[in-house]
Image (cartoon, rainbow, N blue to C red):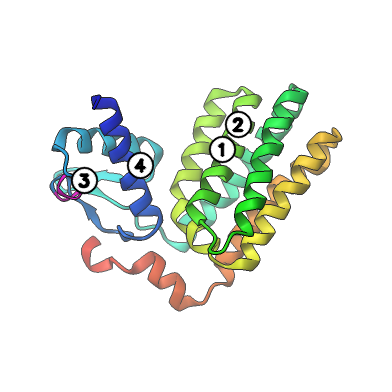
């Protein structure tokens, strides 16, 4: 097996464990433990953690190690409001240059998201994969590398919260309906509606967190305070 494929596999597993809550907010991720779980050596794990650090999904603390970020409500609010503004701009830029072929690519991803939503049980990770592919493709079409890298970084930071909220059926259906409306606006060249829907889609996800019960929020954000301290 090539080293790159081992690193990619380690990166994929660690990311999935963070998103699904196997690694809790504030918890340290130890190279030795991950290498034992995956039955691989430590260097690929170290490289995978560096890759995830670049996305903001993990943080490295000097002389302490690598940790899952412990975000506060204020952190999440800042990330989502900034993400909403950037995604709106990405949509505006993309619609200036998008082709019919690219629109069909986006619509295929939306159709797959719609299929997944009505599976029983729903594979939330698979939904997130297609959701991420939709936005990543839109960013590629927009063609602003710095903006895209920044927006992708924000997306990674809140992916564990997205996984949690998408387990609520109402929010999951709302998410896929937004994407259908966005792609329809793109198909008709309605730039104003597409941008407005994109921004509202992101901000509505923030409202889901605001409306969550305090006990649930605390469990998501503060379950590893002892580890963090």
Q: Quadrant of residue 172?
A: bottom right
Q: Which residue is mark 3?
A: 38
State the residue position of label 1.
133
Q: Find disc 2 in the rendering and name its residue.
A: 137
Give the main secondary structure of the magenta stretch.
helix
Q: Quadrant where the N terminus lies?
A: top left
At numbered mark 2, what does the secondary structure look like: helix, strand or loop? helix
Q: Is residue 202 above or below residue 2?
A: below
Q: Are marks 2 and 1 in contact (CB under 8 Å)?
A: yes
Whether residue 100 sits left or right of residue 202 in the image: it is right
Whether the magenta-drawn stretch holds residue 34 is answered as: yes
Which percent across, then down, holds residue 45?
21, 38
Residue 50 vs residue 71, the one in the foreground: 50
Count the numbered circles shown: 4
User: Which contiguous range is marked in magenta?
Assistant: 33-37
Pair 3/1: label in front: 3
Residue 54: x percent and y percent? 36, 35
Specify the label residue 185 is tagged with: none
Mark 3 → mark 2, Cα distance in angstroms: 31 Å
User: What SS does tag 1 mark?
Assistant: helix
Q: Residue at x 82, y 35 (%)?
A: 187
Q: Residues within 10 Å of mark 4 (few under 14, many from 20)?
A: few
Give me the residue at 56% from left, 38% from top: 133
Q: CA distance from mark 1 to mark 4?
A: 15 Å
Q: Which mark is residue 12?
A: 4
């Amino acid at each position: 097996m090539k080293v790159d494929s081992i690193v990619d596999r380690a990166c994929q597993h660690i990311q999935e464990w963070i998103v699904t809550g196997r690694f809790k907010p504030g918890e340290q991720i130890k190279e030795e433990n991950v290498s034992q779980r995956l039955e691989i050596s430590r260097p690929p794990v170290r490289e995978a953690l560096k890759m995830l650090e670049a996305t903001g999904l993990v943080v490295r603390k000097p002389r302490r190690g690598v940790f899952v970020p412990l975000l506060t409500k204020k952190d999440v609010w800042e990330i989502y409001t900034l993400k909403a503004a950037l995604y709106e701009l990405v949509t505006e830029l993309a619609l200036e240059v998008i082709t019919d072929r690219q629109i069909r690519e986006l619509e295929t991803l939306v159709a797959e998201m719609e299929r997944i939503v009505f599976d029983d049980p729903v594979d939330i990770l698979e939904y997130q994969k297609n959701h991420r592919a939709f936005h990543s493709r839109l960013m590629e079409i927009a063609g602003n590398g710095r903006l895209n890298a920044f927006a992708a970084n924000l997306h990674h930071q809140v992916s564990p919260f997205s996984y949690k909220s998408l387990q609520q059926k109402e929010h999951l259906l709302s998410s896929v309906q937004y994407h259908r409306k966005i792609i329809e606006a793109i198909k008709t060249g309605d730039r104003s509606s597409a941008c407005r829907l994109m921004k509202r889609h992101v901000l509505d996800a923030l409202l889901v967190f605001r409306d969550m019960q305090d006990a649930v929020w605390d469990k998501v954000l503060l379950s590893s305070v002892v580890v963090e301290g």
